[in-house]
Amino acid sequence: MGLDKIFQNQKSGKREAHQQTASGSYGMAASASAEATKAGEQVLRDGGNAADALIAMQFALTSTEGINTGIGASGFLTYYDSEQSETKVMNGHSKAPAAVTSDLFLDEDRNVIPFDERSTSPQAIGVPGIMKLMETAHKRYGTMPLDRLIDPAIKLAEKGYRVNALWERTIEQFRYRMGEEARKVFMPNGNPLKEGDTVKQPDLANALKIIRDKGFESVYEGEIADAIVAAVQDLGGQMTKKDLLDYQVIVEEPLWSGYREFNFAFPVPPDGGGFAVAQLLKLLEPFNIDQYDPRAWEKYFLLAEAMRLTQSDLAAYIGDPDFVSIPLEGLLHPDYLEERQSLINFKYRSERMEFGDPWKYQDGKPNRLIRQESAEQGMETTHFTAVDCWGNVAACTSSIERMFGTGIMVPGYGFLLNNDLTDFSPKPGGANEPDGSKRPVSSKSPTIGFHDGKPFFTLGSPGGFTIIASVLQVLLNVVDHKMDLKEAIAEPRIYISADLSVQWEDGIAEAAKEKLNSIGYKVDTGYKVKTSDSRIGDVQAILINPSTGYMYGAADSPRPGMAGGPEELPKK
Ligand code: GLU
C-alpha cells in the first residue's frame, strides 16, 4: 500500500531545461555532472548494463569532476544483480600505507596537526581504491569492453570541457589547497578558470589512455603506479609500490536493515554511513514521522536527537573490521534500540547523548571503549547511479575527500591524490585510530531499497558526515511523506553536530527554528547553507516501480547534475 502511494505521487518526464529529472522504462542514469550522465545514458542506449553505465560515469567524472573524484579516489559501490537476485557491496575505500602508525597526524610534541595542514600533506594520501573497484565491477558484472567505457572520458579530457559554476566557485574557495601541478590545470598562468572557459586536460587524457590500453593494473603495478609512488615519496610520503600492489577490493554482503515494509542494503564497516542510516531509521520508526508535516519542529527534533545518538555510537564503535571488533548486531538489536529510544522524548532535550553498550546484546568481546573524538570530514565527493532495463541497479559514492583532495596532482598524469587518511581520528586510541594497512571510517552511503525482494529505490550523496543526514531525509521524504522524488531531494535539509549546532537550509520555518533554539539547539549560531550555490549534500536517486519497471531519476541542485535514460528498448 505504501509503495502504491509512493508511485502515485511521482511526476514523469523532463521537468526542467537542465534535465535534473527524467523518467522512462528502459534504464536511467543520474550524476552530478551532465556530461557524465550522458556518458552513462549512451552506454544504456547501446545495450550496456547498469555496471557498464556506472563505470562510464566514473571515468567521465574523472574528467568533469576531478575536483571531487578521479583515478586517485576511493569509493563504495552497492550493486543489485537481477539475474542472480543478489546484492553486493564493493569496498574500494582508501587504505593506509603499511608503514603508517597511530601517531600519523601528531607533531613532535604529540599535538594534532591542524586539519588544513594534515589534509594537504602527503601523509594524508590513502592507497586509492577506485580503479580497482571499477575493475572489480567490470569483471563481475560488466558486459562492454573497457575502451567503450573510457573513450567518452578521454574525449572530454582531450577535446576540452566547458567549465561550469561548480568549478568556478570551488577553485575560488579552495585554491589554497592546490599544489603547483594542480594549479597548472585549474589556474593556468595564474588565472583561475571561470564558468564558460574551456579546459583541456592532456595529462589526464594520457592516463586514461594508458588504463584503456594496458588495463586497470597500470594504476597498481604499471606506469601510473610508479608515477603515484614517485609523487608521494618526493614530497616525503610513505606509500610504496608494494602498498599499491597489495591493494584489494572487498566484495561482501551488505548490511540489511528494514524500515516499514521496505528493506535497505547499505555498505558495511569500515563504512559508517550505512550503519548510521540503518540505525537512524530503526530509532525513528516507532515515532511515526509520517504523522508530522515535513517541516514541523517535532520532526526536526526527532531527527536531531536520533542523529546525536547515532553519531556517538558511530564515533565509539565503527572502525575497520580487520582491526577492531564491531558490535554491529548489538547496535541494531531491538532491545538496544529500545534503550536508546527511551532517551528521546518531547519533554526535554537530553543534555548528553553518550554512546550506549551494544555488547550487552550480542556475543563477543569489546576491544576498547575509548570515547573517540571523531575525524573531520568535508562536504565534497560525488554520488552517481544507474539502473538498466533488466533491473540491475548500481550506486556508487566516490571521493578524493576534500575539494582537490590533498591538492597533490600526479605530474604528467593529471589527477589529484586523495586525503582520505584524514578520515581517521587524528588522535591515537579508539576504533578509528590510524594504523598501517587500515581503512578509515567513511560516511558514504550508496543505498538500495527493496520491496518484496525487488529494488524500488536507490540513492546516495556526498557531504562527509552530512551524507548520513541527506540520505536519511530524502529517504523519509519519499517513504513517509510520499513526495515526488525531485521534491524530496529539493526539500530543505538539516544537519545536527554533536555540539548541538544546526546546519540548515532555506525554507525551514522560522517557528521551527525558534522552537529548536528554545530547547538548546544552536540554529542561529550554526550555519545556514545557501541553496543558491551549495547545500547540505548532493543527492542523486532513482525510483523503480517494481510492478511496471517504470523509473524516475533525479539529480540534485545546484551542482550541474542530470538524470536521463534511453527513450526506447536498447539495441541488444
Ligand atoms: N571522505 C568522506 C567519506 O568517505 C567523504 C567526504 C565528503 O563527502 O566530503 O565519508
Image (spheres, rainbow, N blue to C red):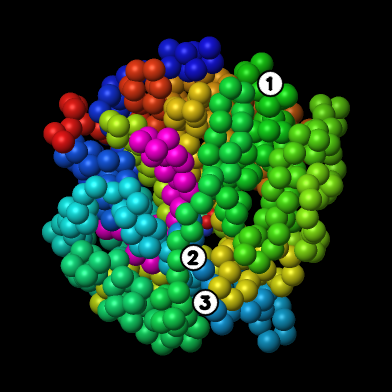
The CA distance from mark 1 to mark 3 is 46 Å
Instruction: Work out whether 395 lies above or below 204.
Output: above
For disc 3, the marked residue is: 97
Q: Which image quarter holds the C terminus?
A: top left
The magenta span reads: 62-90
Label 2: few (<14), some (14–19) or many (≥20) C-alpha neighbours in 10 Å: many
Can residue 449 be seen in this snapshot?
A: yes
For disc 1, the marked residue is: 288
Label 3: few (<14), some (14–19) or many (≥20) C-alpha neighbours in 10 Å: many
363 to the left or right of 527? right
The residue located at (66%, 23%) in the rendering is: 289
The CA distance from mark 1 to mark 2 is 38 Å
The CA distance from mark 2 to mark 3 is 9 Å
97 to the left or right of 114? left
Name the element at disc 3.
loop
The residue located at (27%, 24%) in the rendering is: 25
Question: Of label 1 and label 2, which has the lower sequence position?
Answer: 2
Instruction: Work out whether 127 lies above or below 567.
Output: below
Is residue 289 or residue 558 the one in the foreground? 289
Quadrant assignment, res 339: top right
- The residue type indicated by label 1 comes to Asn
Q: Note whether ligand 1 is within 8 Å of mark 1.
A: no
Question: Of label 1 and label 3, which has the lower sequence position?
Answer: 3
Name the element at disc 2.
loop
Mark number displayed over residue 94: 2
Where residue 140 appears, x then y in whole percent? 35, 51
The residue located at (40%, 22%) in the rendering is: 546
* Nearer to us: label 1 or label 2: 2
Is residue 325 or residue 562 the one in the foreground? 325
Where residue 452 appears, x then y in whole percent? 51, 23
Quadrant assignment, res 412: bottom left
